Image (cartoon, rainbow, N blue to C red):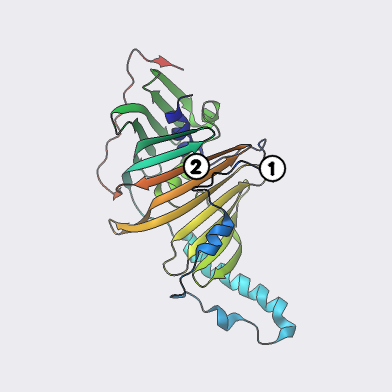
Amino acid sequence: MNKYYVACFLVISIVISSCTLHRKAHKKKDRTISTDSIINKQTNDTLTEIIDTKKLIPNHNDSIINNNSLLDNHLIDTLTYVWNKRMIYNTFSSKAKIHFEGRDESQEFTANFRIRKDSVIWITITAMGGMVQAARILVTNDSFIMVNYLQKEVTKLPLSQAAKVLPSKVDFFSLQNLIIGEPLRNGKITDAKVLNATSWIIKVEDTSYIQNITYNRIDSTMLNGEMNTRNPLGPKAIMQYETYEISDQRKISKSRVMNIQNGVDSMSLDVKFLNANFDLPLEFPFSIPASYKIK
């Protein structure tokens, strides 16, 4: 498979769901993220707190256990507002430079993203400074179409069957959230902790996945997220969000690192968004050359 497609597939299929893969993987040293390094990274003591945890600390040793439970429950209640906060928009478009690292290979390429919220995701991949068009992908709630310009092939599938050609299953809304920079999946907060003076961490669960998401206590932006399948041997993805900027009155992370541990493989994407535009009128051009083979 062409390297451009491996990287493109990772963008699409970071929401990994296979239960047959091993958890352990080789790690890259340069941009690999671990939850320990993320926790230790928070060093700024300047804080505008949403809650004053000191007021919630028990005054009597005999009630420490019960009061700590109340503290956790109060924090969950408080952070539910932060967790439920989502970006409001109709369309999104962006251009990003992406560096892909995989086993024995690396690649630089450019991706252009266009989204009509909850209905269409359009992605084009180019290489060599935009001189070579490699792929174009159109994803809807129920379909997946990819034009492979290098091999002159077209893949058309129901979205539910996209795992036949991609490394894993594809979830439309998780892919949309991944591009925008929001939590990958919905779920219920089952635990919450104060990590330090500048960050919280919440645990969110649904029927298939467990997410651990760290938030900045100053402005409630996401710092990182880790997602695992419920199967303890399943794969995991770790995302780090940096360089938040205001675009059209919305705060968005323009620098992200994504590490995917998938069996014995460890893959990473370093993504730099060059721009971010919301609610512009967008077109989603998608034509299939008549001479291309449809798979």
Q: Position of residue 100 (x, y in %)?
A: 45, 38
N-terminal of the two: label 1 or label 2? 1
Q: Position of residue 148 (x, y in %)?
A: 40, 23
Residue bearing mark 2: 268
Q: Is residue 181 left or right of residue 262?
A: left
Q: Amino acid at mark 2?
A: Ser
Q: Is residue 134 left or right of residue 66?
A: left
The structure residue drawn at horizontal position 41% and vertical position 18%, both measured from the top left corner, is 153
Say if mark 1 contacts mark 2, CB within 8 Å: no
Q: Which one is in front, 267 or 289?
A: 267
Q: Is residue 65 above or below residue 144?
A: below
Q: Is residue 217 above or below residue 161?
A: below
Q: Which one is in front, 242 or 14?
A: 242
Q: Position of residue 60 (x, y in %)?
A: 70, 87
Residue bearing mark 1: 233
Q: Amino acid at mark 1?
A: Leu
Task: Please indicate, yes or no, whether residue 183 appears anywhere in the rendered image.
Answer: no
Q: Is residue 251 left or right of residue 169?
A: left
Question: Element under label 1?
Answer: loop
Residue sticking out furthest to the right: 62
Task: Please indicate, yes or no, whether residue 135 appears anywhere in the rendered image.
Answer: yes
Q: Which one is in front, 187 or 65?
A: 65
Q: Residues within 10 Å of mark 1 (few under 14, many from 20)?
A: some
User: Which tag is nearer the camera, tag 1 or tag 2?
Assistant: 2
The structure residue drawn at horizontal position 35% and vertical position 37%, both measured from the top left corner, is 111
Tally of numbered discs: 2
Q: Residues within 10 Å of mark 2 (few under 14, many from 20)?
A: many
| Numbered badge on residue 246 | none
Residue sticking out furthest to the top: 291
Separation (CA) of disc 1 from disc 2: 20 Å
Q: Position of residue 57 (x, y in %)?
A: 62, 81
Question: Element under label 2?
Answer: strand
